[in-house]
Every structure is written in structure tokens, then in C-alpha cells.
Amino acid sequence: MAAMRAVLPGVPLVLLCFFLLCPCPCPGPLLAGGIPTTLEGPFPPVTVPLDKSFRGNAVDLPDTDRRVQRTVSDFEPEQISVSLSTSHDSVWISWITGDFQIGDNITPLDPSSLGSVVYYRASRSGRSHRATGYSLIYNQLYPFEGLKNYTSGIIHHVRLKGLKPSTLYSYQCGDPSIAMSEVYYFTTMPVTGPSSYPSRVAVVGDLGLTYNTTSTVDHMLSNHPDLVLLVGDVTYANLYLTNGTGADCYSCSFPQTPIHETYQPRWDYWGRYMQPLVSKVPIMVIEGNHEIEEQAENRTFVSYSSRFAFPSKESGSSSTFYYSFNAGGIHFLMLGAYISYDKSSDQYRWLEKDLAKVDREVTPWLVATWHPPWYSTYTAHYREAECMRVAMEDLLYSYGVDVVFNGHVHAYERSNRVYNYTLDPCGPVHITVGDGGNREKMAITHADEPGNCPDPSTTPDTYMGGFCAFNFTSGPAKGNFCWDRQPEYSAYRESSFGHGIFEVMNETHALWTWHRNQDLYKYAGDVIYIVRQPEKCPIKGKRDI
Ligand SMILES: [Fe+2]
């Protein structure tokens, strides 16, 4: 209780309000009279019963919705966004000029025909700066009769440098000789260090572009995030044929297509819809399976890799699939589940180097994200990423990762601290927030319920490949491929749409709240202080395992 009293003064008034007003069913610890902390864990597993009144189809925004339509002309910038570089002194500004083309005869635009320029200045300094960047286009090509090809507008990425921390900047982007954007604003991250943190980091996964997505984004905006983490599965353009016909389940509705088609304009719709949020709040994205989007010559992830700016080069990565960055005293690891992760892979070697460089005196918090969860108890995607867990969990544990954020499973779940299927006070808290609101089904059934345990041989993801379920024949999870009740590592699970807010208070305490779309904006469905214990769990150097 001493630790709880110590942190309560830092609890925002609104959180205390929703705590007091929290309607049933509340998670057990809340009824005890305070916000729980991981120090009091591990907690008995909680499953919130399915609230059927909030189900229903998640319907995609149609192309007639004004929020997805093009509102600029010719080569005026649109789909404007901000993303971070590796520290507070640099960000990326991205935008698109010129319209896409889709059809049988497409003529790619010439990216060299337009400049990529950003004018920016600290709102109070008055001195204007100019930065230039690069531009590209991408094509999504299907060499099959009757399928339409796509070529994008010109995508621009410009890196701004020399920025002051925690400072409001105004900016305009475009080509000064043709058209510049309106004035937009963003605020830089706090200085990298142990005593400054972004106020609120929104975490969301599997977002899509449905009416439920708009509810999620509205709720997220109401929480005024400083940074958005999108943990994979962005637009769900791959639930469409190239003629624009969509379905909630591609393989069910279109089983005979020669290649898994996509309708790339959905990406443009998504970029337009998101602009009001991400032109002012930086967004950091990691790839999910819906970004694979295979096309001619076996090319994959082309839209994902082209449209977003990633601090890959700045963080020593050679790939858009994995990178890292700092936000105040938090070091974020953005990891790729759909690229090699074995110990001999480039990603693993990069991760070892990146972790070795992290100084926990400077960035006490170490947060890792990737798309498919390792510790999910829902039937959907059960154990899909087991091979990735086998390959990487020891390394992440040895460096004392505090929190893991995942998506992929369309529901919410928070784990107790866990490592190798064993409750461990020094293991990370794993949080799945794949409940952003896309048009696919909500995950509802759990693998520990009678009849819902999948055959292990069917669980590996077809794209990731590999079969590592043999890990359940020995070791701490022996005989427990599926449990006969909610596993002890699963602290709280609930099938609802929503998003989370990660709010680091200081070197040891971070408040995590999960907000359900069906609740009033400031209510939280799940809330807990995640507490680091650097003395109990040494973090200087690599922890022995
Ligand atoms: Fe996914």
C-alpha cells in the first residue's frame, strides 16, 4: 500500500473519477479501493463476460464518406503525417501529392518532378528553417487478366533536424514553386533522459477504417496523446479485390483469386481520414500481416514501406521492418514478426547491438512492440508466433524489457509479468490491443474453453512458417499447449473495441489504461500501474538467464 499511496498524488483527477464511477463488471483489484500495481501481482485471471449489446458488424467507411475523399487539387499536399526519428531533436514529415491511378492503363508519376520541402519554426522563436527530403512512388501490380494495377501519388518524406525538446513547431510542406500546405503544428518529444516522459502514448492495433475505427480514433483524440503507436494491421486494403469489392473475410468470399488482391485506394482513404490526428501527433507504425500485400515478382509490404517514414537508418537498422527510437526516458523497440528473427538473422544481430547501446540510466523504460502476441489466450491466432518467442524471448528478458505491446488478436488482454510461460516478477507485462476496430471478426473464444483448443499443427502462421509447438512437450509449459482454465499468466481479458494509453510518471511507475469504445471517453475498462523494480531486477548490463 505504501507504493500505492506514493503514486496516487500523480493520478490525474479524471482517472480517479472514472475509478470511483467504474460500472460493473470491474476488475477485482479496483474494488479494493485503489488503482492496482504490478507489485501486488500476480493477479488471479479475470475474464470479463462478453457484452453482446456492443457487438455488431464493423462496417468500412465507403469511398463516398467525405472523410476519405480527396479535398486538394493537382499537386497540393494531402495525407500529411508526422513520425519520430530516434530522439527529440528530429522528426519526419510525410505527405502525398498528385492522385493515384488504378486501372488497366496507368502511367506512374515522376517523383523527381516535384520538390520535397518543409518550412518549419518553433512557435515562439520566429526563425524559419527549411528542410528538403526525397520522394518516391510505388506500384501495386497484378499480372493477371482482369485485375487492375495501381500507382500511387508522389510520396514525400522530409527529416527535420536540430529541434528543441518539448517544443511546439509550426510547419508547411510541399513544393514552394507549385503548392505548399496549410500551416500545421506538432510538439517534439521531451528530452531523452530519465526525468522527462511523453505525457500520454496511445497504443492501438488492427485499426482498419470502419465506423468502429472512427470511434476508436475519437476516443484516442479525447485522451490527447503525444504519440501514437500503431502495432500493425493498418488499412485492411487486402480485404478487397482490385475492383473495389470488399469482404469481411477474403478467403471466404474470394477463394478462387489467382493472387491475394488488394484495393490500394483504401490506403489513400486511410491517410486522408487519419490526417487530422497524425499531422499533429507523431505516429509510429510496425508491420502486421495485413501489410504483406503480395504482388507481381513476389514483392511484399511495398505500400507499408513506401508510405511511412521510419527511423531505420538513424537507429542502425537496414530495414523498415524493425527499428528503435527514444521518447523521453523510454526506449522503444519496434520489431518485425514477418521477417527473419532467428539468432543468425540481421534483425536479431541488430537487436543485440541496439540493446547493448541502451543506457537505462538515460532511458529507464524499455518497451517492445511487434504485431502477433506471444502471450494471448484467445483461440484466434493462438500460438502463431511461438517460433518468434522461442527465438527472441531470452534476449528481451535478459535486457529487462518492461512492457510488450502487440496487436493481431482482435480483443484486449493484459498479462501478469511472465517469462517462458512462468510467472516472473522481472518478466515483461504483455499487452494485446488488437481491438482497434477493423472489419474482421472480434476475437471472442478462448483456447482454454472446452472445444476451442486448436490442433498444434494448424497454429503456425502460414507466412511466418515454422513449427515450435514442441516447446509444450517439455519445460514450464509441458502438457499445456492449451490450459483447462484461463492461464495464470493471463491477468485480464475482454472482447471489446478500444485503445490504450501508456503514461510514464517517473523512472519506476507507469500508468496503463485501456479505454473501451462503448464507454464514455474518460472511462477505463482496465487500469494498472506498471512498476519497475530496478533493484530487484538488475538492468545494468545483460541479465543472466
Ligand atoms: Fe494481424
Image (tube, rainbow, N blue to C red):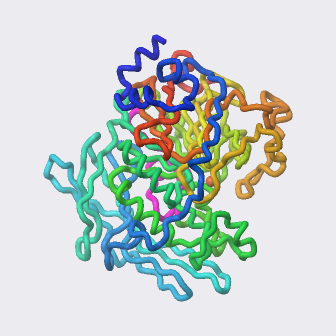
> Going by the image, does 442 lie left or right of 166?
right
Image location (x, y in percent) of residue 257: 71, 75
Residue 23 in sight: yes
Query: Picture quarter containing residue 509?
Result: top left
Residue 226 in sight: no
Name the residue at 59% across, 77% down. 242
> Going by the image, does 143 lie left or right of 13?
right
Task: Classify 461 as above or below 189.
Answer: below
> Going by the image, does 322 lie left or right of 270?
right
Name the residue at 62% across, 47% down. 52
Name the residue at 48% across, 12% down. 1
Task: Classify 213 as above or below 545.
Answer: below
**Which residue is farthest top?**
2
**Which residue is farthest front?**
53
Query: Picture quarter containing residue 383?
Result: top right
Query: Is residue 314 on the magenta stretch?
Result: yes
Query: Where does the magenta region start and end?
Result: 304-329
Query: Picture quarter containing residue 154?
Result: bottom left
Q: Which of 273 and 420 is in front in this view?
A: 273
Q: Which of 16 and 298 is in front in this view?
A: 16
> Going by the image, does 384 lie left or right of 169?
right
Task: Classify 390 as above or below 81.
Answer: above
Image location (x, y in percent) of residue 298: 66, 70
**Which residue is farthest left?**
126
Name the residue at 50% across, 61% down. 209
Image location (x, y in percent) of residue 146: 64, 85
